[in-house]
Amino acid sequence: MITRTTVQTSLVRWILIVAAGEIVGFAFPAVVGVSMNSSPASAPVIVTAGFIEGIILGGAQYLAMRRDLPELRPEVWVALTGGAAVVAYVCGLLPSALEPLWTTWPASLQFTALAALITAILGSIGAAQWFELRRHIRGAGWWIVGTAVAWLLGLGVFFAIAPPLWHEGQPVATAIAVGLIAGVGMAIAMAAVTGLTFRLLLNHDGALGRRRHGYQVRTTSTGR
């Protein structure tokens, strides 16, 4: 029987594993992004670092999920997460890369493009992971929503911490340290929300399964 203590323990375990994975993974784009800030070659290197971050995050999530979803395919989950991270980073870099172009657009078109990019950034990982998660749990579409909210909160924490502490002329090591500290806050916030989402999905899936089983038992006993 799943008790409240069991759920709380599982959630804490999820947060520890997933946050640790994201902290390690985010160190790659954080270091690259600050070190190559003014380099014209920074974009492909940052995207590559983002792919590494996604791979590490996907692996951490798999480790946190495998007890509850033993048939989850790690190679698929990790690959989907890494690919989605590339999409998110490309979308995040597009505004600065295409600034001479989009700044000439009408305000309405700028707003529409920005909304599309934000949606892609927040939803890319959850949407990609849905392709594998839907094979193992009912209502997996809510994972997309929960993951988007998780990244919205996580990025909110990051931007609340890092930009106020970054300034011109700052030593590279200090700027990297600020980014890493902000990344820790982002990772914990993201892990907490995705962990809660996953536990809710598991509980919902179990409740549906019990109701379906009860219906089958009643049907069998009545001969209908």
Image: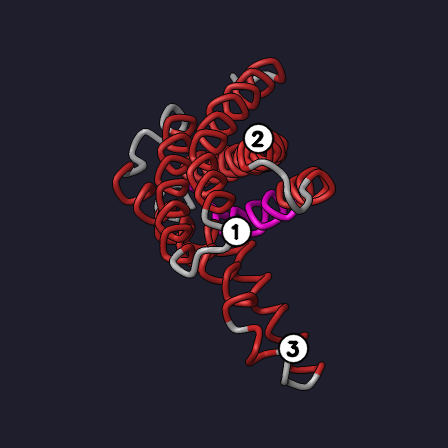
Asked whether the viewer can see residue 218, the reply is no
Residue bounds of the magenta highlight: 137-153
Q: CA distance from mark 2 to mark 3?
A: 33 Å
For image coordinates 50% across by 68% down, the residue present is 97
Residue holding disc 3: 110
Q: Nearer the viewer, mark 2 or mark 3?
A: 2
* Residue 151 position within the rendered picture, expressed as x and y whole percent measured from the top left: 59, 45
Q: Residues within 10 Å of mark 3 (few under 14, many from 20)?
A: some
Q: Is residue 42 above or below residue 107?
A: above
| Mark closest to the chain's N terminus, 2 or 1 | 1
Q: Please tell me which residue is depicted at 64% across the width and 76% down the height of the picture.
A: 112
Q: Indicate the quadrant where residue 172 lies.
A: top right
Residue named by callout 2: 177
What amino acid is found at the position of numbered circle 1 in the picture?
A: Ile
Residue 106 drawn at (x, y percent): 68, 86
Q: Please identify the residue farthest to the front as the structure is shown.
A: 169
Residue 17 visible to the viewer: yes
Q: According to the image, label 1 marks what residue?
A: 144
Q: Amino acid at mark 2?
A: Ala
Q: Earlier in the sequence, mark 2 or mark 3?
A: 3
Dominant secondary structure of the residues highlighted in magenta in the image: helix
Q: As drawn, is 155 to the left or to the right of 141?
A: right
Q: Residue furthest top?
A: 5
Q: Position of residue 38 (x, y in %)?
A: 50, 55
Q: Residue at x 50, y 51 (%)?
A: 37
**Element at label 1:** helix
- State the colouring used for the structure image: secondary structure
